[in-house]
Amino acid sequence: MRKNTLAGLVVAVVLSLSLTACKDTKTLRENEQLKAQVAELQKENGQLGNNIETLTATRDALTKENQALQAEIKTPKTKRPGTKASARKRRRSSRQS
């Protein structure tokens, strides 16, 4: 009976070790995939950071331009002398020849 118990215990240990090794391989594979995903996300994060900087600079430039245009609208324009209409008007003669 001791031999059966010992043999069962050995079989259980061997099976548990093989399952553990299998799980470790699966875990290692998942870790590699996750590392690759993290690297890709970090790359995208850097690109998005650059995009934000570019958009912020563009926004600031547009804000300055907008303020300048608003100031230009608010300042009164100098009056320019307009062209006067001709003093003489052509009249139709009521005579018909």
Image (spheres, grey):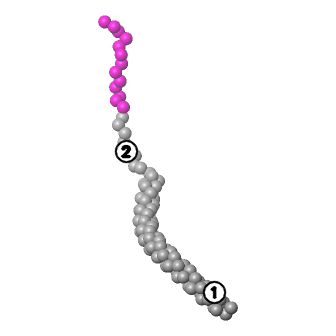
Residue 76 colored magenta? no
Distance between the Cα atoms at labels 1 and 2? 109 Å
1 and 2 marks in contact (CB < 8 Å): no
Residue 94 colored magenta? yes
Which residue ends up furthest to the left in the rendered image?
97
Confirm whether residue 22 shows in the render: yes
Q: Nearer the viewer, mark 1 or mark 2?
A: 1
Report the quarter where the C terminus lies.
top left
Q: Is residue 30 left or right of residue 1?
A: left
Which residue ends up furthest to the bottom in the rendered image?
2
Overall secondary structure of the magenta section: loop
Q: Position of residue 34 (x, y in %)?
A: 49, 74
Element at label 2: loop
The magenta span reads 85-97
The kind of residue tagged 1 is: Gly
Residue that label 1 marks: 8
Out of 59 and 47, give the one closest to the viewer: 47
Residue that label 2 marks: 80
The kind of residue tagged 2 is: Arg
